[in-house]
Image (cartoon, grey):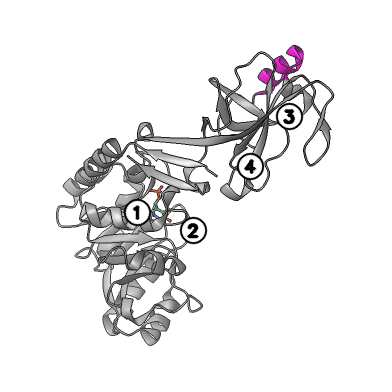
Amino acid sequence: MTLTLHVDGDRWRAHLRRTVEEMPGIAPVVKGNGYGFTPGRLARRAAWLGVDTIAVGTYEELPEVADRYDGSLLVLTPWRPFSPAVDPALHRRVVHTVSRLDDVAALAERQPGARVVLERMTSMRRHGLGRHDLWEASEQMRRSRLRPEGVALHLPLTRGRHLPEVRRLMEDVVGAGLARLPVWVSHLTPSELGTLRAEYPDVTFRPRTGTALWLGDRGALRVTARVLDVHAVERGDEYGYRSRTAPRGGHLLVVSGGTAHGIGLEAPTGDLSARSRAATLARGGLDAAGLARSPFWIGGRQRLFAEPPHMQASMLLVPQGAAVPAVGDEVDVRVRYTTTSFDAVVVS
Ligand SMILES: *Cc1c(COP(=O)(O)O)cnc(C)c1O
């Protein structure tokens, strides 16, 4: 009621098309909250983009995207014997990631003919096979009834500094006899991808990309909340679940957006240095009264929570003298898209 993600449709779609052109072979990632858009919406958008593969984070996410997109479905979380079984209707579309030697045989037994990407450990150290295990897994795959679909390299977020590591890992990929299959990579820039394609002309690099695709043009996105109520308060008036008293006169604003949407006490932006806090204290500002910054912006300024956010709404304190919006007005909100559930996504 209503935290809304507004999308400038023309601008967003133009950015998506440009990114797909810049990153040939891209597998859009549609996991989690779908980067704020919902996975289902992104799956349909991926179909519109004409890609042959999308990536989900977990097996649990498959049902939400499988009937909105009809290409291959790469699961990024490595398969484990305790992973939920895949609907047999999806067996031909799902590509599993395997990151431990033992799982090669276990998956072959569970789902003969399964499509598999072998994950090589990187400096991320999250999941992956070591050099020798990659070679061994490749040998086992040759003997098993699994369908090899390439090698995965999940690289850290160090933009533009991946090449030495990728070159080292490519030696292992070549050594394991896997270089004729695609190499699925994460977090390489278009220019790094270009360099690698020139250095390894026979290898197909396939970038698995979410943020740079869906959220790559922030100017196309805007988040707003509705003002649900406005109450004038005087210094000392009681309010809220915790019966605080207003440290100054002004207005209490009730706006849509609370903990259930992922609205938290910590705002993602703003100067929180000791120096700026000291300056605020000296001015006797509202945060000196123990009020925390909110992600809601009104009149060009980041406002303070009057108390911690509620489940679906938040109370803000707007000090005397500041412009007061009316009930029904929309105010700007700055949130992390990957941790926010919007009530509505409006694409123009
Ligand atoms: C989430 C994820 C990605 C996509 O990350 P972005 O930063 O959103 O592009 C790529 N690869 C793996 C293995 C992931 O888990």
Residue 117 located left or right of residue 274: left
Q: Earlier in the sequence, mark 4 or mark 1?
A: 1
Q: Earlier in the sequence, mark 2 or mark 1?
A: 1
- The residue under label 1 is 42
Q: Earlier in the sequence, mark 3 or mark 2?
A: 2
- Image quarter where the N terminus lies is top right
Label 2 residue SS: loop
Question: Could you say which is closer to the camera, residue 48 or residue 182?
Answer: 48
Label 3 residue SS: loop
Q: Indicate whether 122 appears above or below 272.
A: below
In contact (CB < 8 Å): disc 2 and disc 1: no
Q: Which residues are magenta?
A: 272-285
- Specify the label residue 313 is tagged with: 4
- Whether 274 is among the magenta residues is yes
Amino acid type, callout 4: Ala
Residue 134 located left or right of residue 201: right
Real-space CA distance between mark 3 and mark 2, rounded to the nearest whole angstrom = 38 Å
Residue 162 visible (yes or no) = no
Real-space CA distance between mark 3 and mark 4, rounded to the nearest whole angstrom = 17 Å
Q: Earlier in the sequence, mark 4 or mark 2?
A: 2
Real-space CA distance between mark 3 and mark 1, rounded to the nearest whole angstrom = 37 Å
Give the total number of marks visible in the rendering.
4
Q: Is mark 2 within 8 Å of ligand 1?
A: yes
Q: Indicate whether 36 appears above or below 181.
A: above
What residue appears at the point 19 percent right and 65 percent down from the top-left corner? 180
**Residue 268 occupies quadrant:** top right
- The residue under label 3 is 291
- The residue under label 2 is 126
Label 1 environment density (alpha carbons within 10 Å; few <14, some 14–19, many ≥20)? many
Amino acid type, callout 3: Leu
**Residue 258 occupies quadrant:** top right
